[in-house]
């Protein structure tokens, strides 16, 4: 009997200890940390357990814009067990992203689901690994490489898409322009970065690589929305296996080329394989390269594609702006089709630049440029963070929503309107603003490594598409946004294609 009593007591105490460890302690810690930031304003919580989850089911960053109008440019929210300080003040953003580059680290809250798919690549890594990889990869984005091989590849793939669009015209079928821009961008990053030919543009249906990447993006978004999810889906696991094996195959091919003294392109793959530290030692393993391969594939194509798709949508919905863009294109390229958009001509497209800037302003920013989400997240670590008007305690999560920042009406009057002239200093629409009020490619040491790549890619796509075709949007086109990591048209961009040249 005494033995049974001891067993019962042991079980009860074990249960009690588990309850304290798994429930009472975490809740107490949440309440304590929330108490630490009670001096910071914020919207009332609808649920003691869920916090503000009910408010942000549809579109978090749009809600942050609304809250900023009431609570200012620094306020707090809570997502289940995570307290977050939203920062939209340009001076405070400089403090976090520039002055705090060494003391503030990326928060696992936002990046762990991404890391579970792509691994510890440039987007998700920190410390020595990140610094060495970043330094090495900068070689692949030098102007000389952008001007030569990369621009040539972009022109070839965009020209291929023009031929593909003509097939839709011949069949009198609608084509999803957003899907087409995604295919173009995927082929460009695959070929220019890793010499891998996905041939997404050449296929009417998604191939296995496109499906795997789409699955990855979808699964990451699900995990961000459901932070308490424990098990990974079979689809996600299968997608990771497929993409990792493709990366490993690409590495083997390149290593054999190097071993046989064959000429290899100066791309991301080449730079990583040959990267060495000061002691002459290789700084990356095959696994590291696969992680960068996945990072650039998953994060490195959808942003540029969605930027172009939104720019097309806005131009097609604003005929006066479209007319100006086409006049600019004709004045530079002439009135006949061209096979190549020369690199040196791209800087001449001033009005197109303004249009792209508006799309970037309305949509996103990121840390590697290729935007995974329209925000960046940091943690204050073991030391408090002094902002302009508030002191943030240690171990707090800080979120900078670039979308919300770029929708502050005091910096961008009528931010929802498509006004390219707001970037023309001679225009009545131009407003002077703090330096860090417009940071589409982030700032600080973790700014966009491929911003020039993305701008060149976006310009070449838009120039050729608008020069070669008129587009007739389907009447029931949905102008809404959906967040699938990056922001994209909620129902795609279905349109009929009409050639401008016979």
Image (cartoon, rainbow, N blue to C red):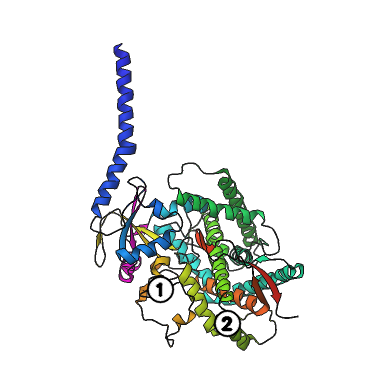
> Picture quarter containing residue 63?
bottom left
Residue span colored magenta: 78-106
Quadrant where the image shows the C terminus: bottom right
Left or right of residue 22: residue 250: right
Q: Nearer the viewer, mark 2 or mark 1?
A: 2
Where is residue 475 shown, x and y percent of the image?
63, 68
Crowding around mark 2 (Cα neighbors within 10 Å: few <14, some 14 to 19, many 20+) is many
Give the image location of residue 137, x and y in percent: 50, 66
Instruction: Kindly state the secondary structure of the residue where label 1 is placed.
Output: loop
Read off the residue under disc 1. Answer: 438
Q: Residue furthest front?
A: 475
Is 311 in front, or is 304? 311
Name the residue that disc number 2 marks.
325
Considering only vertical position in the picture, is 239 above or below 92?
Answer: above
Is 479 inside the magenta-drawn segment?
no
State yes or no: residue 88 in magenta: yes
């Amino acid at each position: 009997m005494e033995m049974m009593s001891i067993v019962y007591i042991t079980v009860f105490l074990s249960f009690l200890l588990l309850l304290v460890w798994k429930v009472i302690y975490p809740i107490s810690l949440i309440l304590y940390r929330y108490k630490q930031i009670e001096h910071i304003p914020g919207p009332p919580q609808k649920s003691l357990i869920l916090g503000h989850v009910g408010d942000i089911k549809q579109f978090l960053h749009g809600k942050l814009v609304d809250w900023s109008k009431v609570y200012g440019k620094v306020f707090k929210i809570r997502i289940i067990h995570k307290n977050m300080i939203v920062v939209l003040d340009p001076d405070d953003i400089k403090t976090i992203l520039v002055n705090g580059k060494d003391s503030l680290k990326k928060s696992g809250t936002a990046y762990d689901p991404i890391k579970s798919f792509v691994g510890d690549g440039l987007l998700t890594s920190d410390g020595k690994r990140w610094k060495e990889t970043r330094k090495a990869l900068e070689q692949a984005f030098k102007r000389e490489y952008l001007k030569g091989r990369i621009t040539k590849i972009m022109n070839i793939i965009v020209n291929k898409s023009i031929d593909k669009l003509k097939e839709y015209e011949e069949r009198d079928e609608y084509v999803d322009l957003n899907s087409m821009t995604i295919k173009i961008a995927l082929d460009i990053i695959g070929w220019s970065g890793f010499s891998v030919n996905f041939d997404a543009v050449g296929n009417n249906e998604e191939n296995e690589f496109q499906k795997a990447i789409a699955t990855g993006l979808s699964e990451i978004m699900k995990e961000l929305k459901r932070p308490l999810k424990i098990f990974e889906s079979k689809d996600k696991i299968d997608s990771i296996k497929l993409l990792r094996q493709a990366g490993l195959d690409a590495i083997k091919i390149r290593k054999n080329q190097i071993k046989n003294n064959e000429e290899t392109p100066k791309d991301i793959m080449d730079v990583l394989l040959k990267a060495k530290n000061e002691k002459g030692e290789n700084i990356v393993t095959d696994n590291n390269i696969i992680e960068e391969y996945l990072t650039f594939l998953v994060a490195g194509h959808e942003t540029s594609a969605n930027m172009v798709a939104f720019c097309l949508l806005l131009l097609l919905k604003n005929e006066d702006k479209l007319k100006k863009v086409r006049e600019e294109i004709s004045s530079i390229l002439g009135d006949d089709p061209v096979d190549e958009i020369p690199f040196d001509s791209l800087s001449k497209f001033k009005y197109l630049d303004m249009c792209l800037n508006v799309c970037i302003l309305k949509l996103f920013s990121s840390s590697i440029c290729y935007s995974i989400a329209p925000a960046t997240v940091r943690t204050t670590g073991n030391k408090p963070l002094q902002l302009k008007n508030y002191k943030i305690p240690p171990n707090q999560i800080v979120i900078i929503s670039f979308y919300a920042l770029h929708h502050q009406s005091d910096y961008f009057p009528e931010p929802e309107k498509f006004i390219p002239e707001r970037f023309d200093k001679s225009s009545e629409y131009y407003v002077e603003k703090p330096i860090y009020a417009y940071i589409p490619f982030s700032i600080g040491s973790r700014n966009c490594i491929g911003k020039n790549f993305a701008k060149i890619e976006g310009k070449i796509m838009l120039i050729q598409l608008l020069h070669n075709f008129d587009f007739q949007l389907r009447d029931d086109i949905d102008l809404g946004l959906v967040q699938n990591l990056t922001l994209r048209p909620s129902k795609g961009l279905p349109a009929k294609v009409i050639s401008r040249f016979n």
